[in-house]
Image (cartoon, rainbow, N blue to C red):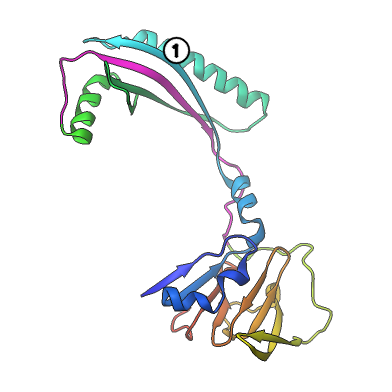
Amino acid sequence: MRRTLFPPGFRQALQLSPLVPRFFGTVNVTSVPFPGALSALGILASDVVKDYSRTVLWRVSANLPIGRLNQEFSTLEKRAAKDFRTEAWPGRVHQNRRVDIRYRGQGYELSLPFTKNLLADFHREHQRRYGYAHPTREVELVTLRLRAAVKSTTARVGTGAPACPGRAKLGSPSTPKVPVIFEGKRLSTMIYSRHELKPAQTYSGPAIITEYSATTVIAPGKHFYIDDEGNLLIALQQFADKH
């Protein structure tokens, strides 16, 4: 079975240890651009999301108090809009309303989208989730929840080969070799700067790949190349198809 590992952050050498294939079989490894800053880039590229809630504990028998619910949600929405303005987030605020609802006397709730059919939706979901429902039983509206979000204006991470500002370069114009010990054997090992690797060209281990935020160790017998998105792909066997 062939699996793919995505090494977390700068811990490349650990994930590429020769012990990994022994436990997981034939393994492919994908190292994304700027691996040491991946979490930070994800935060910058993600949507801005804020969650608001209000506990109400309203008992309902037949008719849903639409007016009171809209009033409470409107208060939450105004609060969300004020927070986004205060923090100067650009763009339209997208809002999602939900209600935590349960049968009276229960100690747990179902969280459902707020619509005029909330009660019918609750009975239907309770039947689906737990195998029974009580359409004539009194229910409780426990918590009103609002999720407000603004779409990120940051360019999507990972599209195209990334630029490499401020990245350290090796002093020698040719690729240097250094002795490295792999499983007790001293092997002559190539050292590459990641940004100098040519896309789609296959390289072989043993090798050490340096870059601004991480260092990747490629064990003997492994092959690797850079794809069009700037990802570093490593496998135990020669790549049959790079596309």
Q: In the rendered view, does 27 fall on the left or right side of 151?
A: left
Q: Residue 170 at what x, y percent from top left?
A: 80, 77
Q: Nearer the viewer, residue 84 or 213?
A: 213
Q: Residue 235 at what x, y percent from top left?
A: 50, 79
Q: In the rendered view, does 107 fall on the left or right side of 149?
A: left
Q: Nearer the viewer, residue 192 or 26?
A: 26
**Displayed quadrant of residue 221:** bottom right
Height in image: 163 above or below 203?
Answer: above
Q: Nearer the viewer, residue 63 or 4?
A: 4
Q: In the rendered view, does 131 fall on the left or right side of 227?
A: left
Q: Residue 125 at what x, y percent from top left?
A: 23, 31
| Element carrying mark 1 | helix
**Displayed quadrant of residue 189:** bottom right
Count of marks placed on residues: 1
Residue pushed farthest right?
171
Q: Nearer the viewer, residue 195 or 237?
A: 237
Height in image: 169 above or below 35?
Answer: below
Quick check: can you spot residue 243?
Answer: no
Q: Amino acid at mark 1?
A: Glu
Reply yes or no: does residue 152 show up in magenta: yes
Residue at left offset 16%, top offset 25%:
133
Q: Residues within 10 Å of mark 1 (few under 14, many from 20)?
A: some
Height in image: 187 above or below 199?
Answer: below
Residue at left offset 67%, top offset 76%:
209
Quick check: can you spot residue 58?
Answer: yes
Residue at left offset 50%, top offset 13%:
75
Q: Which residue is mark 1?
A: 72
Reply yes or no: does residue 243 show up in magenta: no
The magenta stretch spans which residues? 132-159
